[in-house]
Image (spheres, rainbow, N blue to C red):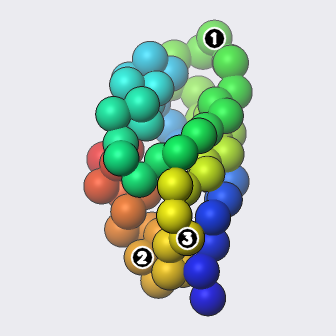
Amino acid sequence: MFVRTIELMAEGEKEDMMKKLDSSEMIGDYDLDTADIKKDKKNIILSFRNPVDIKYVAPAVNSILN
């Protein structure tokens, strides 16, 4: 099965996440919540440029966001 869009929760600073997502060639678009709390978990909707096999989604997201 392949996916194009996922929604997940991630912890970290908003600016740091945005930098990583902007520099990724895999990510076509994203929506990151605008919570002001720096270490609060953030809801992220990721849209991949190309469909990604579901078994590679977790490793791909880990490599992008560390």
Looking at the image, is mark 3 or mark 2 earlier in the sequence? 3
Instruction: Name above or below for residue 13 compared with residue 49.
Output: above
Between marks 3 and 2 in the image, the one whose residue lies nearer the viewer: 3
* Residue appearing at x 50%, y 37% in the figure: 11
* Residue appearing at x 55%, y 70% in the figure: 51
Residue linked to disc 3: 51
Instruction: Name above or below for residue 33 compared with residue 2.
Output: above
Q: Kindly give the residue lying farthest to the bottom in the view shown.
A: 1
Q: Position of residue 48 (x, y in %)?
A: 54, 56
Secondary element type, mark 3: strand
Residue linked to disc 1: 36
Looking at the image, is mark 2 or mark 1 earlier in the sequence? 1
> Can residue 13 be seen from the camera position used here?
no
Residue 5 location, quadrant: bottom right
Observer-nearest of 57 and 14: 57
Secondary element type, mark 1: loop
Instruction: Name above or below for residue 26 compared with residue 12.
Output: below
Q: Are marks 2 and 1 in contact (CB under 8 Å)?
A: no
Q: Residues within 10 Å of mark 1 (few under 14, many from 20)?
A: few
* Residue appearing at x 50%, y 72% in the figure: 52
Observer-nearest of 26 and 15: 26
Q: Position of residue 37 (x, y in %)?
A: 60, 15
Q: Are marks 3 and 2 in contact (CB under 8 Å)?
A: no
